[in-house]
Amino acid sequence: MKQNTKSQARKLARYILNHTQKNSPETNEHMLKIFSRLHAYGGLQAYFNDHELKKTTYYKYKAAYQFGAALKIRSLFNEEDKIEKADRERAKKCRRNALALAEEINSLSPDYEKKHLELRTSANFPKPYTNKKIEGKRKDLKGLPADWIDQVISELPIQHKNAALIMAVTGCRPFELKNGVILELVDEDLLRIKIKGAKYKKNKQGQKERVLTVASWTVPSLFNLAYEEPYEIWINRETYRKAVRRAIDKLGFDNISPYCFRHQFAADLKAELGENWTHEDIAKALGHITDRCQQYYGHPNQNRGRGSGILNIESSGPVKKTRGTFPEQDNSSRCSQN
């Protein structure tokens, strides 16, 4: 293979960076962390030879390595230009390193399967893609004890307990909790919990905002937070998810995630259907703009036997009546992440 010249290496780096201009800062930061780790290991190829990577992981690492290498090439050439007269030896080293990175990028084969044929046995091949139906979380509530949420919250570190309680009381989505949920006390007896809808901001498929009211004595820890003035609770999604995962693993519950709190909330509300709530009310509580998707959330038979604790439900917009008859079909995948 013909070696790269400085102009060719610059052109290669520029080409890669031009195609990553639309990346978010968070994405670029994540890719640079991957590049730093792989570069310290000896390069992507060296890491690939020593680790069994899934196909998707390989392409992700490759994209990250190319991005980081392109930035490094540009930085090395800029440094060379600045010190070329003052420190020729160091300038030559910068040039060598930049050209070596350019050669490494060029050497990365786009044929993942070919690399695996050369380096792996057939037993370690990635499994072929199958269009397998993704199951929702509603089915995972089956067999859980009535106090499973209390058990999980008791195992959480203190900084995550109130966030988990908010999810249990309101059924809010983790992303909505990430954006912040507002607690406000009313007449020292009622606690209003205001949630900004995640689906509305993204694609306007959900309620812009909803407010759930509970008796303050049912959630004393939340009541204390909002006693003097409105209080906002928010999470770092990844840190919170890991904390819940550790608590669940310790308790030995299978297939449970933070999203199961939302399904349990729906099940508890549905158990009060007709007596306290309509399908329209349940849709508002879940942040939906139609009354149909609620049928893919917790079944009333999965309620915990203690009531939802909700006294009032408000939403910023109306709910369209599109559902069929109740009870719903046991098909928990279609709207499981709504």
Image (cartoon, helix red, strand yellow):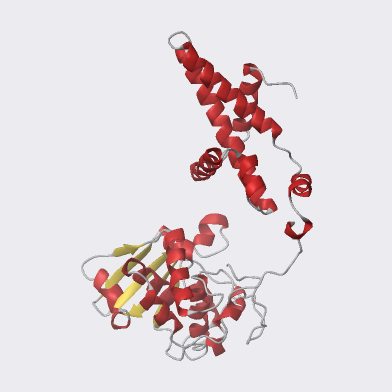
Q: In this view, does 133 lie to the left or right of 34?
A: right
Residue at 61% in and 26% down: 100
Question: Residue 244, relative to residue 312: is it above or below?
Answer: above
Q: Is residue 118 left or right of residue 199?
A: right
Quadrant of the frame with the N terminus: top right
Residue 182 lies, in percent from the top left, at 35, 65
Question: Residue 101, relative to residue 308: is it above or below?
Answer: above
Q: In which quarter of the image is residue 45?
A: top right
Report whether residue 196 is seen.
no
Report whether residue 44 is seen.
yes
Q: Could you say which is closer to the camera, residue 49 or residue 309?
A: 49
Identify the residue at the far top of this view: 85
Residue at 26% in and 69% down: 225
Residue at 33% in and 66% down: 159
Quadrant of the frame with the C terminus: bottom right
Question: Residue 76, relative to residue 23: is it above or below?
Answer: above
Q: Quadrant of residue 66?
A: top right
Residue 118 lies, in percent from the top left, at 77, 46
Residue 36 lies, in percent from the top left, at 51, 40
Q: Could you say which is closer to the camera, residue 55 or residue 237?
A: 55
Residue at 42% in and 77% down: 152
Q: In this view, does 62 lie to the left or right of 207?
A: right
Q: In which quarter of the image is residue 203?
A: bottom right
Q: Could you say which is closer to the camera, residue 43 or residue 249?
A: 43
Residue 201 lies, in percent from the top left, at 51, 56
